[in-house]
Amino acid sequence: MLRWLTLEAMKRQCRIELDFTDEDEWLESTGEAEEETVLNILNRSYEDLIETYGKVPVPVVQATLELVDKSYQHRSAIGTQQMYLVPYTIDYRIKNYVKLTSNEQSNNTRYGCKNL
């Protein structure tokens, strides 16, 4: 179940006609996966985002949409030449929302996102 993304927003981001439904199931599944990816990078739960900010911050929504678009354009691994695990623009949008903890290793290091 999508938490903050909508099918319409993902279609617009991926430049898919709104009445074209062949990709809907794939988009919804990918949207869920990318929302979870962003939560892992942020070291937060969805409930924590809502409690802290009152809603999912717009930069977090936009970064998640960008991840969906990247997945839509490249349905498999992009390649071994990719320099960053998280694209710079996505990193830049969400790094202010990363929850840091003092007594345990954050998800950022665990997931290889040392550039956050």
Image (spheres, rainbow, N blue to C red):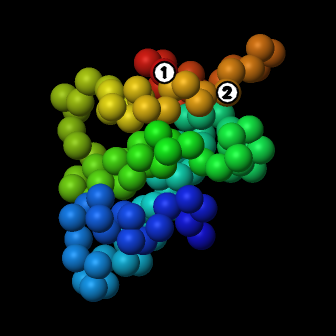
Label located before the other in sequence (2 or 1): 2
The residue tagged 2 is 99
Left or right: 116, with 76 as reference point: right
Instruction: Give the crowd class for mark 1: few <14, some 14-19, many >=20 residues within 10 Å.
Output: some
Left or right: 18, with 85 as reference point: left
Left or right: 64, with 16 as reference point: right
- Circle number at residue 116: 1
For label 1, the SS is loop
The answer to whether residue 75 is seen in the rendering is no
Q: Report the front residue among 20 and 59.
A: 59
Q: Position of residue 14 (x, y in %)?
A: 26, 61
The quarter of the displayed image where residue 22 is located: bottom left
- With respect to residue 54, does 91 lie above or below? above
Q: Report the front residue among 56 and 84.
A: 56
Q: Position of residue 12 (x, y in %)?
A: 29, 65
Rendered residue at 53%/52% (across/down): 35
- Circle number at residue 54: none
- Image quarter (top left, top right, bottom left or bottom right) of the N terminus: bottom right
